Amino acid sequence: QTHVRNQVITAVDACQQDNRLFESPTLLVGPGGCGKTQTARCIANMVAATEFNTVLAQSLKTPGDLAACFLEQKPGAVLFLDEASGLSDAVQLALYLAIDQRKVFVNAKGSSPIALDIEPFVLLLATTHEFTLNDSLRQRCRLILRFTHYSPQELEQIAKHRAAALEWNVAPEVFVEAAKRGRGTPRLVLRLLNASQRTARADGADTITMEYFRKTCILESIDKEGLDSTEQRYLQILLDGPLRLNMLAAKLALPKRTIETVIESDYLIRSGLIEKDGQSKRVLTKKGLRHAKLLSKGEGYE
């Protein structure tokens, strides 16, 4: 994430020069597993935060929950509000009022709301679905960090760093093959690497070889395109011809929304394996057709 890294370095240098807190609020946007949480931790370390606190947005159900959370923050702390798309409209309203006024409002029985000052702290918001945030909240973010999927070469380097940190012995070609199956997401590459280490240790081996990696891919039903068993079935169903979403849902026994948001949008369309025709039918591309034929023969894992 070169662009994000440069933004963060510039912002940290500027706040240190001016002896002030990091830009707050900062919005981190991008696909899951691409480093938003890790970047938030890096920011906290770089600015020598007094505390780093992570809160799941869904746990803040009312403005009162938000007020209690903000009042708990110490001066110079970094508060990382994860999955910010889960904030209700009422909580988002309370949030940007707190940002503007540096106060939270607490309801007291039989009297008007009481305004309480909050300590100066850094607020980091993370979401994969930026459109769920109110425009008023997005516009108040002083810095927006946009994360994208990684290249295979970047994933390979990330996997090497993790293996070195854990002192694992890994054959060089394993990193290359794991990165190809990583779908641009570090979390998936590291999960596959962990699974390969588990397979090797189950056999009493100290080195993750290509043999153990291939065995792991078969155990985990991960093919050479990084597809799992459900996605593989999806492609094989389309070998019979283009289908509408409702027919695919019936054949896969899955909700239509799951197919659209989890299976298709997450990778199949992005990878160029399928596309939609003018009637919104799902169609295999040349690449998808080739791979689906391999899967139908029990191949496609090498």
Image (cartoon, helix red, strand yellow):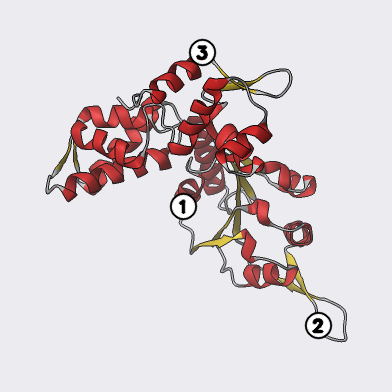
Q: Amino acid at mark 3?
A: Lys
- Residue 94: percent from left, percent from top: 77, 62
> Do the CB atoms of the residues marked 2 and 1 lie less than 8 Å apart?
no
Q: In the image, what residue occupies the spot 75% across and 50% down?
A: 137
Relative to the observer, which residue lies in front, 23 or 168? Answer: 168
- What's the amino acid at mark 2? Ala
Q: Which circle marks residue 41 in the picture?
A: 1
How far is mark 3 from mark 2, CA to CA?
A: 65 Å
Q: Judging from the image, what secondary structure is the residue with disc 3 in?
A: helix
**Label ID, residue 255:** none
Q: Tell whether 101 sits left or right of 32.
A: right
Amino acid type at image mark 1: Arg
Numbered disc 1: secondary structure: helix
Of labels 1 and 3, earlier in sequence is 1
- How packed mark 3 is, by other alpha carbons closer than 10 Å (few <14, some 14-19, many 20 or more), is few
The residue under label 3 is 286
Sequence-first tag of 2 and 1:
1
- Give x and y (percent) for residue 256: 65, 40
Question: Where's residue 296, x and y in %?
Answer: 41, 24
Do tag 1 and tag 3 residues touch (Cβ < 8 Å)? no
Residue extending farthest to the bottom is 110
Q: Residues within 10 Å of mark 1 (few under 14, many from 20)?
A: some
